[in-house]
Every structure is written in structure tokens, then in C-alpha cells.
Image (tube, rainbow, N blue to C red):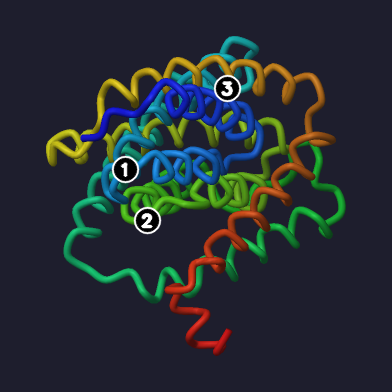
Amino acid sequence: MIDPSTDLLTLLALAAFAAGFVDSIAGGGGLITVPALLLTGFAPVEALATNKLQGVFGSASATIAYASKGHVDLRKQLPSAVLALIGSVVGALVATVLPGEALKIALPLLLVAIALYFALKPNVDDIDRTERLSPFLFGLLVVPAIGFYDGMFGPGAGSFYMLAFVSLAGYGVLKATAHTKLLNFASNLGALGFFAFASVISWKIGLMMGVCQFIGARVGAGLAMKSGAKLIKPLLVIVCVALAIKLLSDPAHPLRALLRI
């Protein structure tokens, strides 16, 4: 494990606050924190593991904020949270043995599709719509599948939860955001357990960033509840597009080779 200087610790603290703020509204906080951790000299697996630790604080903070205002019923959603956690643990285990090339190719395209959905589809607001999937089937099939993805790969999981809640569960945007943070917390916690067992987490750095992430998420969730879909929708679109660009900026990304970029 590395021992960053004071300047780099300050950078990580600011990155964690900004990530907590953005993630509590639209997801994608890892866009900020993972590159920051890599910049300070962390190996990729250590960066991902430490990011899960500090991310737990942010998702917990946002969940508490939304639940305190009645936007999510924690007791009612507990079974879904448990399934998300189990899915993420299984995903983290699978990630150690299976290549993720196909997933890496598909992910930027999926993120752009999600951005287009929220940018162009009319009537995507804070009003609940007709559900296309019963709560039982949604919790049994959709939640653990996205949790599995979050444990196996991670980027964009919040966007997938948002899309599922809006398009399948019929939730308004603010309600979908609140429920997404709860399931993000559960799947982060599951993956964190696996990484802790593997002893690849920088606990001091992760906990320091976690405090900053907690504060940033609290501020972001408060702003989201005040502004609703007017803030969440455009920020979600921006985050999805930014994450797609970030993934494709990697010269080793398999889609670049496929398209001969």
C-alpha cells in the first residue's frame, strides 16, 4: 500500500466530496474517485477495492437522506437490498475467473442508450407511471442481475438501476434515484466484503475519503430532493456520456480495436 503526500491526500478528499455529490444525484462517482486513486499511485485492483470502501459511505449517506424524507421505505426494500448484495458478491467472485471483454465492448453502447432514453423520452419526471413488472419479479430478477454486474464490473450500475426503476417499476425520477442509492449501498457492501477478504483495500485512505464522500452525498441528495427531475435528468445524461467517453478513451479498450479507432 502507498502512503500519499499531504497534497495527494487533499486531492483524494476533494475528489471524494465531489464524487459523493454527483453520485447521490445521478451516479457515476467512480468517474472521479477511481482516476484520482490511480493518479496517487494505487494499483488498479487496490483503487477499485478502496473505491468500494469509500463508496459505501456515500451511498449510505444518500440513502439515509432520502429515507428520512420518505422517498424510500428501508424496511420494505430490505429484501431487494439483500438480493443486490448477494448478486454483487457472486459477481465479484465471477470477475476473478471470467474475462470481461464482451461486457467491456457493450458497456459504452449501453450507457449512450441510457443517456438517449432519459434525454429524448417525454414524460420522464417525478410522477410515478404504470409498472411493467411486478415488485416481486423486479426484486427477484432485475435487482440481483444489476447487483451481479456491479460486483463483477461496476461502472454505470447506478444508471442501470435508474433505468430499470423508471422503465420497468414505473417510478418517477426522484423516487428512482432514492431507491437506486439503497441498492447501490447494498451491492457496494457486498463487493467490499469480497475485497476485504482478499486484503486489497487501503483502509486509512478509504475511510478518510469515506467521510468526505458521506458529506458530499448528503449535500447532493438534499439538492436532488429540492430540484427533482429538473436536476437529476440532465446530470444523469451527462454522467452516462462522460462514463462512455472515459471507457473508450482507454487505448486498450476492445471496442476501439473492433472499430479500428
Residue, disc 2: 153
24 relative to 12 in the view: left or right? right
Q: Are marks 3 and 2 in contact (CB under 8 Å)?
A: no
Residue, disc 1: 42
To which quarter of the image does residue 260 belong?
A: bottom right
Q: Callout 3: helix, strand or loop?
A: helix
Residue 70: x percent and y percent?
A: 63, 15
Which comes sooner in the sequence, label 2 or label 1?
1
Check the image and report above or below for 248 versus 5: below
Label 3 packing within 10 angstroms: few (<14), some (14-19), many (20+)? many
- Residue at position x 74%, y 21% in the image: 223
> Along the line of sight, which residue is nearer the eye, 17 or 40?
40
Query: Which residue type carries mark 2?
Result: Phe
> Along the line of sight, which residue is nearer the eye, 59 or 138?
59
Label 1 packing within 10 angstroms: few (<14), some (14-19), many (20+)? many
Residue, disc 3: 217
